[in-house]
Image: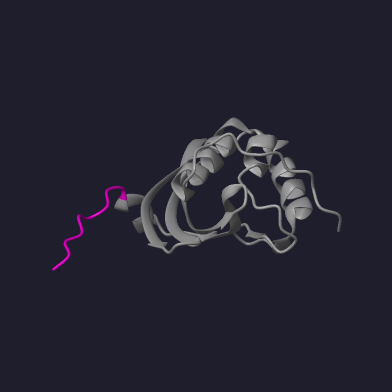
């Protein structure tokens, strides 16, 4: 599959900045801003809840374009857990997604793992893997303070 054309992200220099831009692009339905968050690599991967593994920016772009054809995705991340090193960062987040159903809006939880690498263009997403969450995950909301001894 040919590489999709990516443009440089206009966000700052951290994985946190890229993650913020990614979720903002979902909420705005902005495919160009969303794809600017991804690394320009053949092996980037994305898995949506219950969906197949999408490999490469072309497949990922096509999936998000299809989703945006139905409107924006009202998603808000919380309960972020981070593992950081010099050249890679892993975030595990709970996403609160608003679903518009015939009987009104409902909220669902999705548990996602986002992986970022430091590239020549700055930090970029290389993997987004999302799975259905639980009702308890929606209730987490506030992260418990962590104390190091």
The image shows residue 113 at horizontal and vertical percentages of 50, 60
Res 101 visible: no
Most distant residue in the left direction? 149
Seen at 50% across and 62% down, the residue is: 88
> Which quarter of the image is occupied by the N terminus?
bottom right
Which residue is pictured at 67% across the width and 43% down the height?
A: 35
Q: How is the image coloured?
A: one colour
Can you say whether 111 is above or below 28 in the image?
below
Residue 129, magenta (yes or no): no
Q: Is residue 93 left or right of residue 136?
A: right
Quick check: is 147 in the magenta stretch? yes
- Quarter where residue 144 is shown: bottom left
Residue 67 percent across, percent down from the top left: 69, 43
How many numbered marks appear?
A: 0
Q: Is residue 112 left or right of residue 59?
A: left
Quadrant the C terminus occupies: bottom left
Seen at 62% across and 57% down, the residue is 48
Residue occupying image coordinates x 52% and y 41%: 23
43 or 109: which is nearer to us?
43
- Residue 61, x across and y down, in percent: 73, 47
**Which contiguous range is marked in magenta?**
141-149
Inspect this view and state whether residue 123 appears: yes
From the top left corner, tell me how far across and down residue 131 is, in percent. Answer: 53, 61
Observer-nearest of 47 and 145: 145
């Amino acid at each position: 599959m040919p590489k999709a054309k990516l443009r440089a992200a206009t966000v700052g220099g951290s994985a946190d900045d890229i993650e913020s831009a990614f979720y903002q692009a979902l909420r705005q339905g902005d495919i160009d801003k969303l794809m600017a968050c991804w690394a320009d690599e053949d092996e980037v991967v994305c898995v949506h809840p219950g969906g197949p593994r999408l490999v490469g920016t072309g497949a990922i772009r096509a999936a998000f374009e299809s989703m945006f054809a139905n409107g924006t995705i009202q998603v808000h991340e919380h309960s972020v857990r981070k593992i950081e090193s010099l050249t890679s960062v892993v975030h595990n987040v709970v996403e609160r997604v608003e679903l518009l159903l015939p009987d009104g809006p409902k909220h669902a939880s999705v548990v996602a793992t986002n992986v970022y690498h430091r590239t020549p263009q700055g930090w970029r997403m290389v993997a987004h893997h999302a799975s259905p969450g639980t009702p308890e995950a929606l209730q987490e909301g506030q992260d418990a303070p962590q104390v190091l001894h």
